[in-house]
Image (spheres, grey):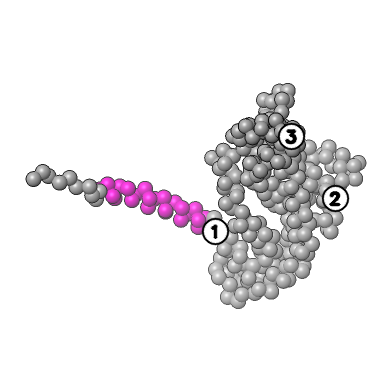
Amino acid sequence: MGRVMSTATPPVARRSRRRPQVITWIILAILTVYALAPLLVFAFNSLKSAREIGSNPLGLPQAWNWDNFATAWEQARMGGALLNSGMIAIATGVGVAIIASMAAYAMTRLDLPGKGGWIVWLLVSSSLPIQLFLVPLVSWWSQLQLYNERIGLVIIYWAVYSPFATLLIRSFLVGVPREFEEAARLDGAGEFRLFFRVVLPMVWPGVLTAGLVAALQAYNEFMLAVTFIQDRAYQPVALSLYSFQQGFTTDWSLVSAAGIIMALPVVILFLLMQRKFIEGYAAGGLAN
């Protein structure tokens, strides 16, 4: 009888295959600890007293002071600040999604002069630091009565975050076939109808991703907010936390509790929409 060939994987091959997997898991574990450890310490400090933070800054709280959150909510005026941030973030996300999607449609579907020049302009404008324009912006916004107004800050966010969002949505539109649009044009559809009825449903993941990214950036932004918003009633949550920290520099338990309150909406939104983020970047070809 002929010799039966064994199909089992040799032990040496199995060990060599497991070795990269073990190294990968070790690296992932180290990165996880590196990312989560500061957040855990921050969360533990929000449940301690000010005296306990000084004696035990890294360990678990001995007494879980949940009242810190209520005190921080009241003293830092987090309710009004979160409302302001929510309004600014939503207005920024919706505005950027509309501006960027229509600009990307014009760049990919309309016969614009110098299309390559527009792409270069978007790349350059998205890379320039906003600090270059702060002085003239403050002067113009004061003359236009937009200084110390939430809508004035939102307009600046539209201008700052729209270039990248336009490039993101454009990467979606490049891969969309034009056959659907040609059929709609034969039926007499205009450009606006083509955009809203035909093109927008096909690139909706990219538009949603661009809007969410802009909204999160506006929620966490500090420099422009502290420059253009001075009234305490209009301050977003980042400014409210900063003001609270300046007034309570020694009570880090309340500052930590206020920081947790500020971060919770973003964490919850990301957990709910993380698949949309990943799909949007991957489908747009900008994930790598």
- Graded by Cα atoms within 10 Å as few (under 14), some (14 to 19) or many (20 or more), the crowding at tag 1 reads few
State which tag comes first along the sequence, 1 or 3. 1
The numbered disc on residue 275 is none
As measured in the structure, the alpha-carbon distance from the residue carrying label 1 to the one carrying label 3 is 52 Å
The residue positioned 56% from the left and 38% from the top of the image is 285
Q: Is residue 13 magenta?
A: yes
As measured in the structure, the alpha-carbon distance from the residue carrying label 2 to the one carrying label 3 is 40 Å
- In the rendered structure, the answer to whether residue 61 lies left or right of residue 109 reads left
Q: Quadrant of residue 176?
A: top right
Which residue position holds label 1? 36
Q: Are marks 2 and 1 in contact (CB under 8 Å)?
A: no
Kind of residue sitting beneath label 1 = Leu
**Residue occupying the far front of the picture:** 187
Which quarter of the figure is the C terminus placed in? Answer: top right
The residue positioned 75% from the left and 63% from the top of the image is 78
Instruction: Choose between 159 and 248: the one closer to the eye.
Output: 159
Kind of residue sitting beneath label 2 = Glu
- Graded by Cα atoms within 10 Å as few (under 14), some (14 to 19) or many (20 or more), the crowding at tag 3 reads some
Q: Quadrant of residue 97?
A: top right
User: Which portion, as a residue range, is magenta?
Assistant: 12-34
Which residue position holds label 3? 189
The residue positioned 70% from the left and 49% from the top of the image is 215
The kind of secondary structure the magenta stretch mainly shows is helix
Q: Give how far across and how far down residue 201 sits, in percent.
A: 66, 43
**Residue occupying the far left of the picture:** 1
Task: Please tell me whether residue 44 is drawn above or below residue 206 in the rendered image.
Answer: below
Which residue position holds label 2? 149
As measured in the structure, the alpha-carbon distance from the residue carrying label 2 to the one carrying label 1 is 37 Å
Q: Nearer the viewer, mark 2 or mark 3?
A: 3
